[in-house]
Image (cartoon, rainbow, N blue to C red):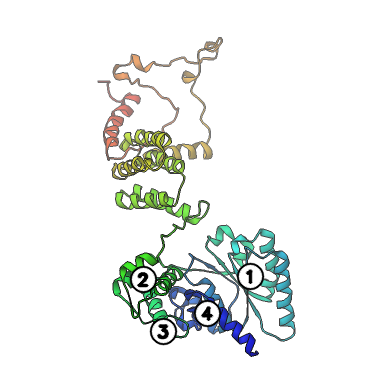
Amino acid sequence: MNLFEQAERDNLKRAQPLAARMRPQRLEEFAGQQHFLGEGKLLRRLLKADRLGSVLFYGPPGCGKTTLARLLAVASKRRFVQLSAVTSGVKELREMLEKARDELSTGGFRTLLFVDEIHRYSKSQQDALLPDVEEGIVTLVGATTSNPFFAVNAALVSRSQIFQFLPLSVDDIKTLLARALADRSRGLGSHEVILEPEAAEFLATSSEGDARRALTALEIGVLSSSERPLRFTRELAEESLQKKAVVYDPDGDGHYDTTSALIKSIRGSDVDAALYWLARMLEAGEEIRFICRRLVILASEDIGNADPQALVLAMAAHQACEFIGLPECQLTLSQTVAYLATAPKSNAATTSISAARADVRDNRVLPVPAKLRDAHYSGSQRLGHGEGYQYSHDAPGGVAAQDYLGVEKTYYHPTDRGYEKEIGERLKVIRKLLRGEEPAP
C-alpha cells in the first residue's frame, strides 16, 4: 500500500461516525449476545471446532449483527464479502459466488458471505444461494430484522443455524459509552469529556438496546459543544438523543407481537400493561380500525357473558372512533381497554362454539327433528313437519319440556364469574325443565 492509499483510508476512517469507528476488532470486545456467544455456547463451540456453517442472525437494529459477521470471518480465517439485499441483484450475487468458487479452487481462502436484510431477497435470489451453501463454497451469514421462519426461504432456513439477537442491556451500552470516551485513536478520548452517571443511564436506557443510537447521541453531544473539558449532563443527553421512531412494521413481527401483548394483557386483567401496549400501537401509527376490531373480538372471546356490556362498549368504541378519529379517539380506546381489562373474564362462548363445531366436523351430522322443521309451506304437514312442537311461550315459565337436538349434548359451561354466575344458576333450572325433571315455576 502506497502513501496515497494510506492517506485515502485515513480520510475515510475519519469521516466514519463514532459507531462505525468503535466496532470491535476482536470477539473479546463484542458486547452482548452471551446466550449464544458466551464461553461454552453454541456459536463459540462451532468456531473453536472450525465447524462454522451457514447462519441467520435475527434481531433488532443496532445489536451487532454486521459487526459479529465481520468478527466471525476474522476468527474463522475466511474472506469477508458483504452484500445488501436492498441494492444487489441476482447478477451481482452470481458474480460473487463464482469468484468465491474460483478463490477456493485455487487454494485461497474460503468466503464468508454476509447478506444484510436477507429477507428482502426474492425467492429466486435466495434459491441462487442454495447450491453454493450446500457445497460449502461460501459460509452464509444472513442478517434480518424479520422473523426468518416467515421471511426467508424455508430451504435456506433448514440449512442454517438461527441465532436470535437480543437488544443490548443497559450495562452493555454503558460499557460501550465508556470505551468510546476512553479510546483516543478511534473514539472521543482526545476531547476531555466527563460523562455524568445520570446522562450515561439516560443514554443507555433511552436507546433501547441500540448501541448505534447511543453512540451517535454521545458523538452529537460532544462534537456540538465547544466547552472543554465537557461535562456531559443529562440535559445534553436529552438534546442529543433525537425523538425515536417506534420500530413497528405493520406487516412484520412488531405488529403481531405488540397486538398479541395487548390482547394477552387485557385477558390477564393487567390494565396498566394493556394501556402501555395500546400506547405503543398508537405511537407507531397502527390502524385504528384494526385495534377496534381486535377489541370487539376480545369482548366475546375473553369476557362474553361474564359482562355482556363489554361487547356493547367495544362496538360503541368502534363507532366512536370512526366518528371522531385521532387524536381524540385515543380517549375512547383508553376507556374501552381499561373497561375490558378490569371486566370479569369468561371464555365459555369460545369453548362452547368450538366444541359444537368439532362435533359437526368429526361426528355424524344430526338430522333436524321433525317437530322443529319448517311447517309454514303447503304440504309440510303431510311430511310430519312441526308435529308435536310445543310453543315455549305457552308453557309455564316460558320453557317447555322438549328435546331440541335428539341426543344429549352439553356445550355451554358458564363460569362462576360476573353475570355468567347468575346465568349458570338459571341454566341449571332451564335444563331440568327441558328434560321435564321438575315443574315450571
Instruction: Compare residues 384 and 359 and report the one nearer the observer.
Output: 359
From the viewer's perspective, is the residue at label 3 or at label 2 nearer? 3
Work out which residue is located at the far top of the displayed protein and give it: 378
Q: Earlier in the sequence, mark 1 or mark 2?
A: 1
Say what amino acid the circle numbered 3 marks: Ser
Q: Is 97 on the left or on the right of 361, as rendered?
A: right
The disc placed on residue 432 is none
Asked where in the image residue 321 lies, by quadrant, the reply is: top left
- Give how far apart the Cα atoms at labels 4 and 3 are: 14 Å
- Give how far apart the Cα atoms at labels 1 and 2 are: 31 Å
**Contact check, label 2 and label 4, Cβ < 8 Å:** no
Q: Earlier in the sequence, mark 2 or mark 4?
A: 4
Residue 215 on image: x %, y %: 43, 72
Residue ID for mark 2? 170
Q: Earlier in the sequence, mark 3 or mark 1?
A: 1
Residue ID for mark 3? 190
From the viewer's perspective, is the residue at label 3 or at label 1 nearer? 3
The disc placed on residue 14 is 4
Instruction: Compare residues 72 and 309 and report the one nearer the observer.
Output: 72
Say what amino acid the circle numbered 1 marks: Leu
From the viewer's perspective, is the residue at label 1 or at label 4 nearer? 4
Q: Residue at x 31, y 24 (%)?
A: 433
Work out which residue is located at the far bottom of the displayed protein and give it: 2
Element type at mark 1:
strand
Asked where in the image residue 397 lies, by quadrant, the reply is: top left
Residue ID for mark 1? 83
